[in-house]
Amino acid sequence: MSSEVTSVPPTPTPPPVSAPPSQIQSPAAPESSRASPLRGMGTPNIASPVRKAVASVSGYLGEVGQMTRLADPRDAWLPITESRSGNAYYAAFHSLSSGIGFQALVLPVAFSLLGWTWAIICLTVAFAWQLYTLWLLVKLHEPVAGGTRYSRYMHLATTVFGEKWGKILALLPVMYLSAGTCTALIIVGGGSMKLLFNIACGEVCLARPLTTVEWYLVFVCVAALLSQLPNLNSIAGVSLVGATAAVAYCTMIWVVSVAKARVASVSYDPVRATDEEDGAIGILNGLGIIAFAFRGHNLVLEIQVKSLSHSFRLHSATDNDGKDKATMPSTLKHPSHVPMWKGVKAAYVIIALCLYPVAVGGFWAYGDQIPPNGILSALYKFHSRDVSRVVLGTATLLVIVNCLTTYQIYAMPVFDNMETGYVHKKNRPCPWWLRAGFRAFFGAINLLIAVALPFLSELAGLLGGISLPVTLAYPCFMWVAIMRPAKGTAMWYTNWGLGSLGMGLSFVLIVGNLWGLVQKGLHVKFFKPADFQ
């Protein structure tokens, strides 16, 4: 029986390509077929050379497992599955870069809407919940050693829900989390560039400042230049720089805010609404902000492809020159989820050490007076005169660096989808000039959305509710469908309960935000982006 590890292709595959017999191994043949022809070749008391050889081969095969082979060779030409030379460090860099960013700076706003007690409870529950579903996705990357390997979130969704329903339920949230986040990064990064220019130039600067749209264009040009790195593995250094910048500016901002003490007339009571409807909408907005802080699950499987460490190389499979003929990303004793989970645990320890101080320290310093844009805006609003311009400029520069680097990892699944169409139609790798054109085109589309639809921030709660199942609900249903835990067991109840609760919470957020938009109206101002302050 052949149990080769396969990687699900991004689109329906052509007829399977048969492998040469030399590539088909069977580490776990049935006991009867393995033992019956050789059992009589030795005696119980004397270990014959044949028996030693058989035992040695059996132990070796049991240890190393199977050679990894792509089900569709064309996957080796796509950005996500092109390179597998990553390790646990790469996984940590990517997970940290995608798991922390500008959304952490808005957490004090959620505290002002929910109050101390409920905000801390909700933040803790959300952190534990998303960490559990992250563990589920890490395990589901290759649920059975030697079985199907899922390298993209959409592949797992279509496998569980079917081709039609998988696209209906998961395509919009996944694409929003990638393209929508990239658009938000342009708004935040471009606006921060404008702030940095104002800080560096000062009030007496004679240079004509660029408009907000022009700063968006500057940001997109730099991001598009960085996006020419070919695959997810090649941006590990970029992710490391971005993660370091995020940790640095989160720490700097909350430390400065706490060190400057609380602002005058601060209150820690939840912001009181004029009526019950506004109060309910405020609570839903607070929950949406906390949920949005834990995005990034749509990138877990893509990142895990790169965490398959080169330490799993099959060193004994070498040619006469001593060079490796193949790699061994996953075996029965060394499954692929081990390095990935190590990286994730390290990353999320650091994420927790950033999110909680920013949320708690920011709310302690500014309370109910926290601006809607979060703690960075509060730092400028209340301490622009008593904090060094060097500190303000450094924090702003770090935000820009983090936005540029985070853009790369969130855009990579979109780049992969764009190149998939060409690769599967032409049956050849995407040429460099077309790859560069795809990535520049994606940046241009994001720029157009950021400029033309500046009111997207008012839809953040609605879109957050739509994308919430990707993080909190779908992984639970995927585990039940693929791993099939026995009905009535703890895992069965846990996953059905959390999955149903996640879908219910998503429904409440969507309905509540739609209700809020109907009550307050949507302030539409096309092609008039506001300054980010």
Image (cartoon, rainbow, N blue to C red):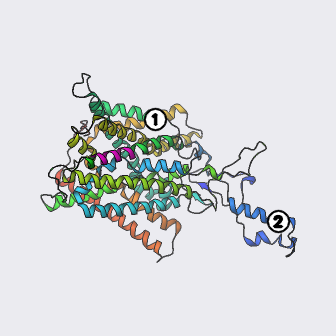
Location of residue 246 by image quarter: top left
Q: Residue furthest left?
A: 274
State which region is magenta.
247-256
Label at residue 226: 1
Q: Image height check: is 148 above or below 494?
A: above
Q: Image height check: is 174 above or below 424?
A: below
Q: Residues within 10 Å of mark 2 (few under 14, many from 20)?
A: few
Badge 2 amino acid: Lys
Label at residue 52: 2
Disc 1/disc 2 C-alpha distance (Å):
56 Å
Q: Residue at x 23, y 36 (%)?
A: 528
Mark closest to the chain's N terminus, 1 or 2: 2
Of 377 and 520, nearer the camera is: 377
Q: Image height check: is 506 above or below 92?
A: below
Point out the image quarter for the N terminus: bottom right
Q: Nearer the viewer, mark 1 or mark 2?
A: 2
Instruction: Return the x and y of residue 394 as percentages of the image width and height.
Output: 34, 37
Is 245 included in the stretch rendered in magenta?
Answer: no
